[in-house]
Amino acid sequence: AQSVAQPEDQVNVAEGNPLTVKCTYSVSGNPYLFWYVQYPNRGLQFLLKYITGDNLVKGSYGFEAEFNKSQTSFHLKKPSALVSDSALYFCAVRDKVAYSGAGSYQLTFGKGTKLSVIP
Amino acid sequence: EAGVTQFPSHSVIEKGQTVTLRCDPISGHDNLYWYRRVMGKEIKFLLHFVKESKQDESGMPNNRFLAERTGGTYSTLKVQPAELEDSGVYFCASSPYRTGSTEAFFGQGTRLTVV
């Protein structure tokens, strides 16, 4: 079974400083990895994904994530945090599905990490 | 292009009552998923439709939950009768049904509180 761990419930960072939100995963095959963000009173928004290729993936709002196969990690990073980055961040792995079908997929999520950027 | 929309945004009901949540996926998306997040926990998969067919309902908690997608457009998720542990945020997501499609697009969620 697939699983995702986000070891930090909350991350606090000063505005302008670099930020990292940690994620490790467990999956039997090759993982598809995702980061989603939930701003207050909003839905989940897709940030970025790793499917294959370059281990450093760039996404929306200046975020990036590095896939590390040996450490089974997919940490989310940003060089300079903004107050507007304060939100709930979810890491997810694509689950294997027992049936065939193009475009079908089921995500396994972590518990989420609340990021607070302090002015 | 309109995103995934969910109704209502909030619902407070008493234990034993019935509640129906609705999800309108992005037009043309044949895949539709329901997920749920109980407070402080992971977002958990409930079920997956391809058009009007239930492809995978392995995540449905019990038979008090009934999901439908008549005509392959919008979907409803009914909880009858609701219990306290059903409280949480219910997310709907959709994606196109084609090779290479990977990420799903989520709605804003319905916050259900059972008192």
Image: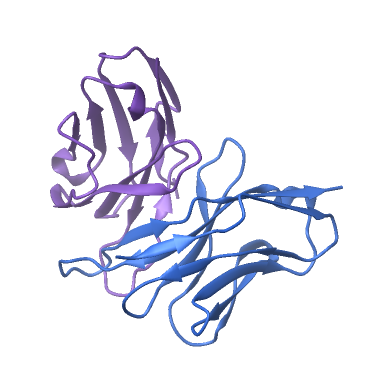
Chain colours: A blue, B purple
Q: Residue at x 50, y 48 (%)?
A: A44
Q: Is residue A65 visible?
A: yes
Image position of B7 with respect to B2: above or below: above
Q: Say above or below: B99 vs B114.
A: below
The number of numbered discs placed on residues in the rendered structure image is: 0
Q: Quadrant of residue B28?
A: bottom left
Report whether residue B26 is seen: no
Residue drawn where x is 50% and y is 85% of the image:
A70
In the depicted structure, whether residue A90 falls above or below residue A54: above
Vertical relation: A80 (above or below) B29 = below
Towards the viewer: B21 or B56: B56
- Say which of B30 and A8 sits in front: A8
Q: Position of residue A119 (x, y in %)?
A: 87, 47
Rendered image quadrant of residue A59? bottom right
* Image quarter in which the N terminus of chain A is found: bottom left
* B66 relative position to A91: left or right: left
Q: Is residue B37 left or right of residue A119?
A: left
Query: Which percent across, then down, holds residue B92?
Result: 36, 43
Q: Position of residue A78 (x, y in %)?
A: 72, 67
Q: Is residue A49 left or right of residue B78?
A: right
Q: Position of residue A105 (x, y in %)?
A: 29, 63
Can you name the residue that lies furthest to the bottom here?
A: A53
* Residue drawn 52% across the image and 52% down it: A45
Q: Residue at left 15%, top 38%?
A: B70
Relative depth, front residue between A99 and A24: A24
